[in-house]
Image (cartoon, helix red, strand yellow):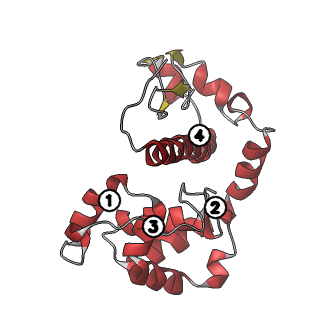
Amino acid sequence: MLGGGGEIVGAKPAPLGDALNGQLSNEEVTVRCATCSVAQLLDYKRSTVDAFLSAVGPDVLARSVVGQQPLRDVWALRFLTGFKWDPKVAAEKFTRMVQYRVDNQLDSVRSRMEEGSLLPRQFPGFEEHHRSYVHSSFDVCSGRARGGRPISIEQVAKFDWAALFAIDVATQDAYMMHVMEWYSHKHHICKHICYTHTHTRTNTHTRTNTHTHTHT
């Protein structure tokens, strides 16, 4: 079974190999683990993740869905990798982010997106912004490649700059917050698609003991 971050729940993470056996810097770990599963990276950096979660504290984690499973581990790693694996700095930034989500009711926004009751055309500021886009695309998960990975195909946008700069700041901010939450929500869905397909291919190769794969 897959967890929220694409990890296989209940399965022991595959070893990362001798190269990650405590011999690399935090920056090198981030690069080498670019294709690792969430479970693998959590397993290797468990002490750092635990220090981060302790610094954030249960009260802050309980204030937002991003501080709870299945999103918590993904967001914890996102902040730790973004702040060079410094649990104290990452925890400070994470706490500020949670307060921002609370102030702007972004958990409610995400919940409506997950329910399907809030679509891009309903975002505050959507009409104002898209009247300024001569050509654009909003689909961030338009299909899958033969390897199972999500594909987003977008045309380079052309803008009516005068109309775009005429949009008031409050509307710009509201639209930006909704778009970023939509991207995060869709990325979470895409990771499920990608990891599910990858896990299926791995099991097939294990059972057949072959690396030959036929696509139709």
- Residue 101: x and y in percent read 63, 61
* Residue contact between numbered discs 2 and 3, judged by CB atoms under 8 Å: no
Q: Can residue 27 be seen in this view?
A: no
Label 1 close to label 3 by CB (< 8 Å): no
| Amino acid type assigned to the residue bearing label 3 in the image | Pro
Amino acid of disc 1: Cys
Q: Earlier in the sequence, mark 1 or mark 4?
A: 1
Residue drawn at the location 38% of the way across and 76% of the way down = 45
Question: Taking 137 as reference, is 30 left or right?
Answer: left
For the residues marked 1 and 3, what is the alpha-carbon distance in whole angstroms? 13 Å
Relative height, residue 181 to residue 41 (above, below): above
Residue 33 got which mark?
Answer: 1
**Dot in front, 1 or 4:** 1
Q: Mark 2 points at which residue?
A: 101
Which element type, helix, strand or loop, lies under badge 1? helix
**Residue 155: numbered disc:** none
Image quadrant in which you'd find residue 36: bottom left
Question: What's the distance in space between the residues labelled 2 and 3, CA to CA?
Answer: 32 Å
* Above/below status of 161 relative to 209: above
- Who comes first in sequence, dot 3 or dot 4? 3
Residue 213: quadrant of the picture: top left
